[in-house]
Image (cartoon, rainbow, N blue to C red):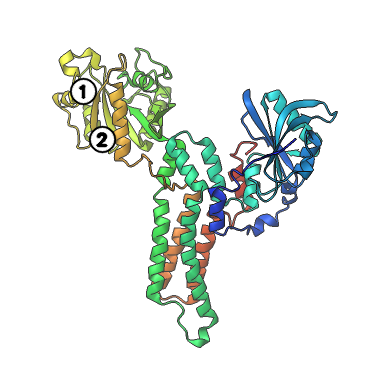
Amino acid sequence: MTAARVEPILSSTDVLDANEEFGMRRSLRGVEQSPLAGHFDQTIVAPATASGAAGLAVVRLSGAGAVAIGARLFRGADLLQSDSHRAHHGFVVDAADTRIDEVLALVLRAPASYTGEDTVEFSCHGSAQVVDEIVDAALRAGARLAEPGEFTRRAFLNGKLDLSQAEAVADLIAAQTRAARRAALEQLRGRLSARVRDARDTLLAMLAEIEAGIDFVEEDIEFLARDEAERRGRSAAEMIAALLATADEGVHLRSGIRVSLAGAPNVGKSSLFNALVRSPRAIVTEHAGTTRDVVHETLRLGGVLMQLEDTAGLRAATADPVEAIGIERSRRSHREADIVLLVLDAARALQAEEAAAIHDAAPGTIVALNKVDLLPPAMRDGTQAAATWVREQGGRLPAGIEAVAVSAQTRAGVDALTEALGRQVVAQRLVLQNDGLVAINQRHREILLRAEHAVVTFMASLEADEPAEILAADLRRAVGVLGEISGEQVSEEILDAIFSRFCIGK
């Protein structure tokens, strides 16, 4: 039987091109000396596709013994003699040589594989039973079950990906919008790594020159002039600050933009919430105070994910302790939201506290005049209907606060309200459409804040004309901290925390 030639997918794409360009090498001394090193030398197996019935599934083996174990399970060609990136048709069998399924076996030789190790992938029928039996056969043949994220962890340990790229794999799998998918792909291609490396290299070059001056202090040679050190220090600080500025975008990409519905009891917040998400998620009754806790639902608007929060109605006082807790949670939801949707009731007069809330509305607030179906037709038509109603009621809309007339009951105006949400997103620069986007996560933010502090300390030391040894110590600290993003300096505990959020098989 002739084996088909299969060109590498991940191992020769832009991911590895970027890695070669940036000269990545395995330099994790702490990891290499870990007592777990032998653990990661074992051959592992796991389904690489999601569980459940499907047309196809993939079971992946990786490690020094992957080809030998795969050869024990496969009938149709001798995998031990196979070249890398060759696919073979045949059958997987169990220990009794009983056929489990008809498969394609793909052999990927180290280092040209996702993990950088010898890899065998069996493409089988997507039956959970078939997958379980193939995995069980591999376990009986000497493999062990992979831990969550272990394939990607091995790719990191073998220098195929740096740590920020490995994190991007999880982000790409979890991406729920186009913007999130683009950002994760850019990080996987090494864009974040490159920008961190630029800042780190700037600091590292200064450190080398300052240390050279220390080594040759008796020669009275100035290796780095003060004004040049200031210029480079400012440049590195600006690069770090630019990355820190993407922290909010990173939260929005990964978790969604928070939209909190606010208003008095019984103005129709829950009905409007259900109309927006097109599902009866929130309980709706004619009794005030039905909502006692924050109800969450996801809404996709174009390429952006929104987390809608229906909250308890706000009132000055309540004798119900449970409702009081709900009101406090509502206030917290409104404080932390990116966009507040203030809901009014068109069927009754504007209350004094509502007028005050409109007047004091922060940027990111949209006023939704609900129940306009109860108004005369002439008062519910037109784009200015809600703003006109607010003015006639004695209220005043601050500049930049948009008002939309809507009926949760008839769905009139719901599309216009959705469009207003979209405009507010654009106004706050929360729509991330740039293909070159870099958006850091919480781990990156904490590291960059520490690096920024080290650079600020260096600049202060420079201004105070501190000795070169002090300047070198400040720079050394900043360089070391930035190395934590790519994983050049990282602990087992950090790695465990990062890869524990991966699924098994990735």
Task: Give the left or right position of residue 396, taking residue 227 as reference.
Answer: left
Query: Residue 231 at x, y = what percent?
Result: 38, 69
Identified at 76% across, 26% down, the residue is 100
Q: Secondary structure at mark 1?
A: loop
Q: Secondary structure at mark 2?
A: loop
Three-letter amino acid code at the position of disc 1: Leu
How many residues crowd around disc 2 within 10 Å: few (fewer than 14), some, or many (20 or more)? some
Q: Identify whether 350 is placed above or below 180.
A: above
In contact (CB < 8 Å): disc 2 and disc 1: no
Which quadrant, please, contains the N terminus?
A: top right
| Residue 350: mark in rendering | 1
Closer to the camera, 460 or 17? 17
Q: Quadrant of residue 133 in the image?
A: top right
Mark toward the start of the polypeptide (2 vs 1): 1
Query: Residue 335 at x, y = what percent?
Result: 35, 36
Residue picked out by circle 2: 361
Closer to the camera, 69 or 317? 69
Identified at 56% across, 59% down, the residue is 23
Task: Give the left or right position of residue 43, taking residue 504 as reference.
Answer: right
Q: Identify whether 260 is placed above or below 246.
A: above
Question: Can residue 183 be seen?
Answer: yes
Spatial CA span between label 2 and label 1:
15 Å
| Residue 316: mark in rendering | none
How many residues crowd around disc 1 within 10 Å: few (fewer than 14), some, or many (20 or more)? some
